[in-house]
């Protein structure tokens, strides 16, 4: 299951199985992850950003002031800021956003990633334009991704494949991640992105990745130094047989490790080295697989509602 370097204390102990059903403080310990990923009470003070008559994002004052220098592309009115009304097609809007993103990146507002994402007013809405991934938080535009819970059934209980992120990653270096996770580039569906990421990150063939079952979504609204992250994560469960072992294919993951699900629950509960949004997807996994019997029905319902906060 990969090298033991960096393994968390207690992962080798089968005695961890089943103990979480007597923890009265479990809800509060899981809920803090929801609060950490939803750290802005309301968008008060942010400026709505529209494409046509649909709001697609939120702007901070600094970026709004910078956009005021592009009157041919961005107009301001009582309702906030909007791309110029003459930009009616997806291609024209994308070209305008590319011009803006390139200029703003040169001025240090964000770093371009060289990967276009679809711009939508709602997670399921039509594509209105495309924007570089690095500019999404600055514009407060919804970003979508996939997260896969890769698990194995063993006599002692469920085990989860965990990827240890590369120490060179700009976000959450060296922390625990899913077997497969990644943002959805423009033009791809969640299922198509899953197959692509499974090959690139974990060396999983398409016929195995395609077995992943969609189980819902997790979303959050997080303010950080980049702007406003409005992330929607499409969650999948992928049951793997014992003989299938993920192997790093690119520089995203240092190694993979197969860990008892109960041990991962304790790690999430105790605030261990887990990437911030992975905590949320794992909490959803624990709920769906009956591992949170310590929660009251009201606590379980509140946790599930808290795991999806992007409309």
Image (spheres, helix red, strand yellow):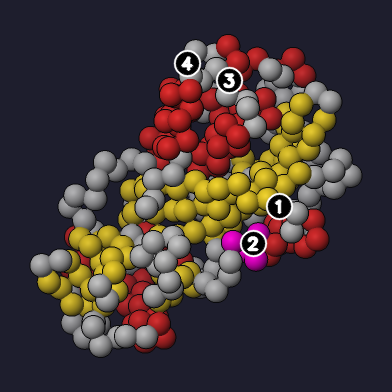
Q: Is residue 100 above or below residue 12?
A: below
Rendered image quadrant of residue 286: top right
Q: Are marks 3 and 2 in contact (CB under 8 Å)?
A: no
Using residue 259 as the reference point, say whether residue 136 is left or right of it.
Answer: left
Q: Are marks 1 and 2 in contact (CB under 8 Å)?
A: yes
The CA distance from mark 1 to mark 4 is: 33 Å
The numbered mark, 3 or 1, whose residue comes first in the sequence reads 1
| Quarter of the picture holding the N terminus | top right
Q: Secondary structure at mark 3?
A: loop
Residue at x 54%, y 57% (from the top left corner): 145
Say which of marks 1 and 4 sits in front.
Answer: 1
Q: Nearer the viewer, residue 228 or 144?
A: 144
Task: Measure the C-alpha gap from mark 3 to mark 2.
Answer: 31 Å
3 or 16, which is in the foreground?
16
Q: CA distance from mark 3 to mark 1?
A: 26 Å
Instruction: Locate residue 85: give its quadrant.
Output: bottom left
Q: Tell me the crowding category of disc 2: few under 14, some 14 to 19, or many 20 or more residues within 10 angstroms, Cα based.
A: some
Q: Which range is magenta?
A: 190-194
Q: Secondary structure at mark 2?
A: helix
Tell me the distance, in whole angstroms, between the alpha carbons under discs 1 and 2: 9 Å
Residue 193 on the magenta segment: yes
Q: Position of residue 46 (x, y in %)?
A: 21, 56
Report which residue position mark 2 lands on: 191
Q: Which mark is residue 25?
A: 4
Nearer-N-terminus badge (4/2): 4
Instruction: Judge whether residue 167 can be spotted in this image.
Output: no
In the rendered image, the vertical position of residue 226 relative to residue 239, given as above or below = below
Q: Assess disc 3: are there few (<14), some (14-19) or many (≥20) residues with their C-alpha within 10 Å of its C-alpha.
A: some
Say which of marks 4 and 2 sits in front: 2
């Amino acid at each position: 299951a990969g090298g033991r370097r960096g393994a968390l204390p207690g992962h080798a102990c089968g005695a961890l199985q089943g103990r979480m059903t007597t923890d009265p403080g479990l809800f509060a310990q899981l809920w803090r992850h929801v609060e950490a990923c939803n750290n802005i009470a309301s968008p008060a003070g942010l400026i709505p950003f529209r494409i046509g008559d649909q709001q697609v994002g939120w702007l901070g004052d600094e970026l709004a002031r910078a956009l005021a220098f592009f009157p041919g592309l961005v107009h301001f009115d009582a309702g906030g800021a909007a791309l110029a009304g003459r930009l009616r097609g997806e291609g024209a809007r994308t070209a305008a956003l590319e011009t803006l993103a390139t200029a703003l990146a040169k001025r240090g507002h964000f770093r371009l990633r060289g990967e276009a994402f679809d711009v939508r007013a709602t997670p399921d809405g039509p594509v209105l334009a495309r924007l570089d991934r690095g500019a999404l938080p600055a514009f407060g535009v919804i970003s979508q991704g996939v997260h896969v819970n890769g698990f194995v059934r063993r006599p002692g209980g469920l085990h989860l494949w965990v990827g240890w992120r590369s120490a060179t990653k700009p976000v959450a270096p060296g922390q625990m991640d899913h077997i497969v996770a990644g943002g959805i580039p423009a033009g791809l569906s969640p299922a198509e992105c899953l197959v692509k990421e499974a090959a690139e990150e974990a060396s999983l063939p398409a016929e195995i990745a395609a077995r992943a079952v969609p189980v819902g979504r997790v979303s959050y609204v997080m303010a950080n130094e980049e702007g406003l992250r409005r992330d929607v994560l499409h969650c999948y469960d992928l049951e793997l047989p014992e003989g299938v072992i993920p192997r790093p294919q690119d520089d995203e993951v240092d190694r993979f490790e197969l860990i008892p699900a109960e041990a991962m629950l304790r790690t999430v509960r105790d605030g261990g080295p887990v990437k911030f949004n992975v905590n949320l997807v794992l909490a959803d996994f624990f709920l769906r697989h009956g591992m949170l019997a310590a929660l009251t029905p009201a606590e379980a319902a509140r946790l599930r509602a808290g795991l999806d906060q992007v409309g």
